[in-house]
Amino acid sequence: MSFLGGSEPQYDPADAFVPEHVPEPGAFLADHDVLAGREHVALHRTVADAFEEYGVYDATFGYNLARLNRDPRHTDAGFRYAEEADDPTTLRAEFTPTTAFCPQAEPLAVGAFRALDAVDTHGYDLVRVRVDATLDGSDDVNERLAKLESGELDPNPASSVGPKLTERGGSGSGSSPPF
């Protein structure tokens, strides 16, 4: 039974690259060395591990976001990867959400960036993550991702914003309710 109550689809095997079940590379990957076959699968396994470690989950489907690439219900959604043409130590990752108006696209893309930026198991010196242009508002999301990548924005803003929580989960601002 799935997270939403229906039966689970027959996912593609984790060790298979099924071109019909992943999005076409978009503009962010154009003119770069797009990974396919075994190279894509090996990197995607590392991505799945990073997403698991850092909790990058699709709330709608209730699974690790990397699993979207293997979900036959969404053949035009998921991640594609490329090595940057001028610098093969730079990984480009492009996320295509399931719909043009996906409300989770920005937090998922930011989460993907944070997870991939935090690990070194992928073997790249620099990771660039962008959303595909099919997402409404992709320019704004990609601008934020570029600022995270450059260090202009704090990749972990939650660590420096908001009230400190007490042991019991309250804000520590007194004994009155927070409303």
Image (cartoon, rainbow, N blue to C red):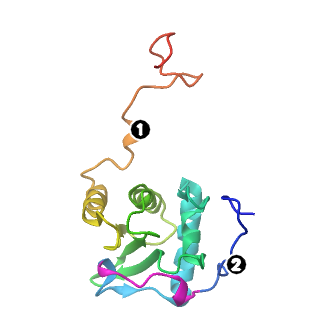
Q: Residue furthest top?
A: 175
Horizontal and vertical percent position of residue 35: 45, 85
Q: Amino acid at mark 1?
A: Ser
Residue that numbered label 1 is attached to: 159
The residue positioned 47% from the left and 58% from the top of the image is 115
Q: Amino acid at mark 2?
A: Gln
| Quadrant position of residue 116 | bottom left
The residue positioned 57% from the left and 88% from the top of the image is 18
| Quadrant position of residue 26 | bottom left
| Quadrant position of residue 133 | bottom left
Q: Which range is magenta?
A: 17-27
Residue that numbered label 2 is attached to: 10
The residue mark sitting in front, 2 or 1, is 2
User: Badge 1 local density, few (<14 within 10 Å), some, or many (20+)?
Assistant: few
As drawn, 46 above or below 110:
below
Q: Residue furthest right?
A: 1
Horizontal and vertical percent position of residue 21: 54, 84
| Residue 20 magenta | yes
Q: Is residue 147 left or right of residue 99?
A: left
The residue positioned 47% from the left and 70% from the top of the image is 98
Q: Is residue 29 left or right of residue 51?
A: left
Q: Quadrant of the N terminus?
A: bottom right
Secondary structure at badge 1 equals: helix
Q: Nearer the viewer, residue 176 or 1?
A: 1
Horizontal and vertical percent position of residue 8: 71, 70
Horizontal and vertical percent position of residue 34: 40, 86
- Distance Cα–Cα, label 2 vs label 1: 39 Å
Q: Contact, CB < 8 Å: mark 2 with mark 1?
A: no
Q: Main secondary structure of the magenta part?
A: loop
The residue positioned 59% from the left and 59% from the top of the image is 52
